[in-house]
Image (cartoon, coloured by chain):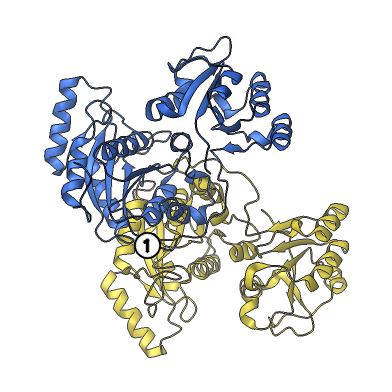
Chain colours: A blue, B yellow
Amino acid sequence: MELRQPYLLFLGDVRDQLAAKVAHGLVHWRRDWCVGQMRLPGCGADTGVPDLSIEEAAAKGARTFVVAVANAGGVLAPSWIPHVVAAIEAGFDVASGLHVRLASVPEIAEAAAKHGAALHDVRHAERAFATGKGTVRSGRRLLTVGTDCSVGKKFTALALEAAMRRRGWQADFRATGQTGLLISGKGVAVDAVVADFIAGAAEWLSPDADPDHWDLVEGQGSLFHPSFSGVTLGLLHGSQPDAFVVCHEPTRRAMRGVEAPIPAIAEVIDMTVRLGRIVNPAVRCVGIAVNTEKLGEGQALTYLDRLAGEHGLPAVDPIRFGVEPVIDRVAAEFPAVSPRSST
Amino acid sequence: MELRQPYLLFLGDVRDQLAAKVAHGLVHWRRDWCVGQMRLPGCGADTGVPDLSIEEAAAKGARTFVVAVANAGGVLAPSWIPHVVAAIEAGFDVASGLHVRLASVPEIAEAAAKHGAALHDVRHAERAFATGKGTVRSGRRLLTVGTDCSVGKKFTALALEAAMRRRGWQADFRATGQTGLLISGKGVAVDAVVADFIAGAAEWLSPDADPDHWDLVEGQGSLFHPSFSGVTLGLLHGSQPDAFVVCHEPTRRAMRGVEAPIPAIAEVIDMTVRLGRIVNPAVRCVGIAVNTEKLGEGQALTYLDRLAGEHGLPAVDPIRFGVEPVIDRVAAEFPAVSPRSST
């Protein structure tokens, strides 16, 4: 799956900012790709980019009309369909993170066929994959793992990509979920792949690269989450990381959506090393990324200090304090093969 | 997926016994369900059951025409198609373990529609599943796990089912792969399920049951296999076993199809307990099942004795010596809630 940039972000008439989370992520991480947003009367979300009509966005060079919202059930509201069709008629491709497939709406399928538009359903895998091979690939890989689902694995990988690029390193975020995929413009929704091919899809996602190149692979789920652990382990084995960062939310008391307890960070590190070394004997943890949103600033700093001491690792909140200490650790543990262009 | 019994086993014109492995498994484990076999000129396989025509099998009550063979590529040979169609016209359902979907062959799809026949492609999942919940279910479950793929996990689970039933216990083999599914008549090919739903499919497969009822869940892959570990872990978490048996092939030097080393049996036990206790804190290993085919009988007995001593567990070869010591161990570790009908 490979999306054409830049995007026009369609927010429809969603009620609040939360429903436009995908659009906010796009503007945060890929401001340059977002020429504007399109909102219908009653829309309660605003990403802060210019409000544009389809024609105005087309004139500014936008190539893909992104349905960048979520609603209950992941359906396309009937009132949105004419706008999707109008975008296709104006020459746009369409991308959607909804559950429903764009081509399952007859008007959209017909318009796309007539105008040669690509329809990207980022929740669904577009292609077939081989089974994983476990063969060592060149280049370096960092995977974000978690004590649970929804603890900042995508945000952390994107923050690491941005920080590495600021230092002049070659670094690419590798998307494994629908929002990440829209932000990256490519990738694979690994949770939508047929089970036998999870590792194979992850291998495809981070191919051979230059020795100093870093893939920042967006993790999914948790080895300790009873619903999604299979995806997590397949992704670990397929991405064969050299390094990983553990993501954590300190106030959560049970795994998301189930009653299982949250594992200790040390347990996640140990298990990730034990299972990860099957495909990369030198795999190691290079940091802990915590979402400290629910803690006061002083409390957050104290907590991160304590974690860092306990684990002998940099502990950061990527949103609040950035990820520089993790990048320093990576630089120290993985000296560049070729001289780096800047530090 | 639920198949109607009994079966007519179609062997086509496959060259040798190995290509009819599925048919041999059916005759071995479900002799009563196999009214006969149907072979075309040139067939080099023979399962030992009566050779019957479609009409003869129908007269004996056969309900499902089972394409019980494998060939390179998993395709349906063009010369087999008229026989499948003739079976449908005679009132049979059709089941196939081939990769190709039966309904993708127009003549077969048309005949099935006309005669109301069910077409079962056991390599493909027939239904959608919910995500796993991790909720504790009633009844008992035993999962076979392995140091690798193809080390006897299906055979061991079936042997345990047979041995438990001989003792009068309530026990059901739960199929997770295509051959197992034909043998069981139902189940789910977990490797064909969308990744997010592996655990959910396994939960569906072994629902709430009587407190003394045992589900013998057919394991898949290995936690240590870089291609298929995701399926293995999802299946472990979804089946929430009380007990597991480790299956092993002692002469193998690398994981099947890849270069990864075979893990030690102790490592598989430890990892299965550590990951399995998330959904069942009391999970424990109750035996080791070894395929000793490549060892002499004395050598095999010595090897099993050594394993039993090293691990403090019954070590058996289910094919050569049976699984009784494992059943004894299960009986000792899991006393029946209600008095058992026999011992």
Q: Nearer the viewer, residue B152 or B137?
A: B152
Q: Position of residue B248 (x, y in %)?
A: 40, 72
Which three-letter amino acid code belongs to the residue tagged 1? Phe
Q: Position of residue B238 (x, y in %)?
A: 47, 48
Q: Is residue A170 above or below residue B317?
A: above
Q: Position of residue A45 (x, y in %)?
A: 48, 15
Residue B338 appears in the picture as rendered: no
* Residue at position x 59%, y 64% in the image: B180
The residue carrying pointer 1 sits among few (fewer than 14), some (14 to 19) or many (20 or more) residues within 10 Å by Cα, namely many
* Subunit that carries the residue with mark 1: B
* Residue at position x 34%, y 56% in the image: A240
* Left or right: A183 in relation to B30: left
Residue B42 appears in the picture as rendered: yes
Q: Position of residue B109 (x, y in %)?
A: 81, 56
Q: Is residue A211 above or below residue A85?
A: below
* Residue at position x 44%, y 18% in the image: A47
Q: Which residue is mark 1?
A: B224
Q: Secondary structure at mark 1?
A: loop
Q: Nearer the viewer, residue A52 or B163?
A: A52
Task: Specify the quadrant that holds the C terminus of chain A.
Answer: top left
Q: Is residue A21 above or below residue B282?
A: above
